Amino acid sequence: MKKVISSFLNSSMRRKLILYFFLVILVPTVTITILGNLIYKNSMSDEQQANTKQMIKQISDNIDFYIKDTENIANYLSQDPSVLAFLNSNSIDENNYKDDISSNAMKIISRFVNLHPEIAGIMIVNKNDSYVSDVMYRISRDPLTNERWYKKAMENKDNINLFSKPVGRNINNIFNYSADNVVSMSKAVYDNSDESCVGVILIDMKLDIIKQVIENVKPGRTGFVYIMDSDNEIVYSPVNKVVYRINKNIFDNNRNNFIIKRIKNKDYQMMSTSSRYTKWRTVGVFPLDETLKVINYMKYYSFFIALITLILAGILAIFFTKSIVNPITKLRMLMRRTQDGDLNVHFNSKYNDEIGELGNSFNKMIKEIKNLVELVQIEEKNKRKAEISVLQAQIKPHFLYNTLDTIQWMAKEHGADNIVKIITSLTNLLRIGLNNGNEIIKLRDEVRHVESYLSIQKVRYEDKLNYKIDIDEDILEYSVIKLILQPLVENAIYHGIKEKRGNGSIVIEGEEKDNKIHIRVIDNGVGIDEDRLREINQILKKSSLARSRIGVGIFNVNERIRLNYGDEYGLIYSSVYGEGTVVDIWHPILK
């Protein structure tokens, strides 16, 4: 991943701008498309659910209407005088239809059946097990008063009793309606004088009327609606393989009456509503893919439009990028020519935008470079003149060396050994310090230089100053920046040993450590207090301009090492006040 990012960041500006433009357009386009489809999907789903719920509620209300209408028929019959006369009669031959009481009750039944074609048959049974009906008859001699529908009506005095698929009854119909084709309703009739049950009215209603109600408002092309009774048994369902794979208790613990269920590798939405009147549940089932079909079409169209938008945006991004990158490319080519030494270039811009201003700045820079080149040429001429002057000035050091040699020879002639020693040390000090103008010398020569300086100081301070130099032979041939030890030794003498009572000593140690040259200048002078020591190390570490606070010599030694070789090298001071000071010099190995 890092390689990919690095490769992209190192690619051309044209490619970057095209990608940036494309991303700026891609992100909002994709976001709006996805969020728009999601919002549209949720809105459509909510509207679909609302419509389906309303449709199922309408079916349930229509069924309730027909059931209530049938109940009203039962109520009319229970209050009709002819029916009541039949129910209150004690001895009537049920096979003698010419009997006046039975005949009158039959006429009333026929009248309602003719007015309501949805009724498959009506039977009225009194408490003496006598009955009268239009098309229904008893199968066996078993009492009708022992039938489930009769007893249920006796138990529920004020309510109707509905029976879906009424199988096992001792009743048949001259039209041979099966139990799957009718729904039965029973209602008890009571005597108003003593509130005793005088009989039961049984009405069979054709399921065709429920089928017609459902088919008129079919949910979608492949959806269907089915009805369940209070015992979760199917009252009516269309012929299909899906309904019998649905658990009949699926809505028992569902408060929202909305379920998505997978049947035969296909997702179905199921929504139900219950009737407070019949206690029946109307369930609508429709495939989820049919519901989402319009949404999917909308989604495809949205993505297609988004794709066309992105293509147009890409073309515009390339066009705009070209208008920006081409002037920059031209300016880059001019810079390459300048890099190769051609200063006779000029950038022309048609516009005064940022790139035009950059081109003008480039033209000014080229003009300034030309002026600087001319100045450098002049400076080179002056430098050559100065070099000649330096060569001429070298006669002076040689004259000084010759004069010191003459003094040294004369001192030997007179036996002045101390003068000879000082002159020898001074000659070495000057010769190594000048070093023909070279900045880098051998560590061995640097040690000789500081040793010459110490020998001169020893003559001056006599027994007050002692010194010792202990440098590993292995590092004496390494090269170092010249004059890094003498300023530190001078500082140790004048600020450490000179201020101390009694004799003082300076020890110079050197070794190779951590692949670096490590030299220590140790003195037993007065030392440095903590605040001053902290200040010195901070100035040395941060290359502070406050060099006057630590001395020019120390600052220059540290700066020359750090500027040439990096911040990991240089000086570090450590000291104990009243005991002495140690200076650690870290210098790279230069073989």
Image: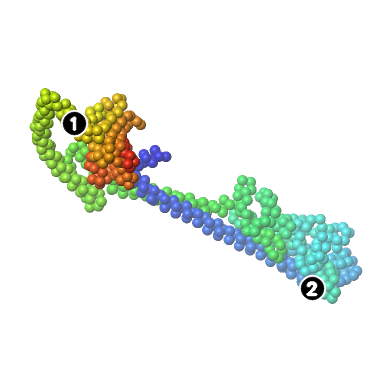
Looking at this view, is 262 or 51 the one in front? Answer: 262
User: Who comes first in sequence, dot 2 or dot 1?
Assistant: 2
Type of amino acid under label 1 = Leu
Type of amino acid under label 2 = Gln
Can residue 591 be seen? no
Query: Which residue is situated farthest in the right direction here?
Result: 91
Looking at this view, is 262 or 370 the one in front? Answer: 370
Per the image, the residue denoted by label 1 is: 429
In the picture, measured across the screen, residue 111 lies left or right of residue 439, that is right
Q: Which residue is painted at 55% across and 57% down in the image?
A: 45
Q: Residues within 10 Å of mark 1 (few under 14, many from 20)?
A: many
Q: Quadrant of the N terminus?
A: top left
Where does residue 503 sit, x and y in percent of width and height?
A: 27, 36
Q: Is residue 438 above or below residue 371?
A: above
Q: Is residue 118 above or below residue 317?
A: below
Query: Which residue is situated farthest in the top direction here?
Result: 413
Secondary element under disc 2, as helix, strand or loop, is: helix
Q: Is residue 176 above or below residue 3?
A: below
Can residue 186 be seen? yes
Where does residue 227 sit, x and y in percent of width and height?
A: 69, 58
Q: Residues within 10 Å of mark 2 (few under 14, many from 20)?
A: few
Q: Which residue is painted at 23% across and 37% down in the image?
A: 490
Query: What label does residue 79 carry, if any?
Result: 2
Looking at this view, is 107 or 273 the one in front? Answer: 273
Where does residue 579 sit, x and y in percent of width and height?
A: 33, 39
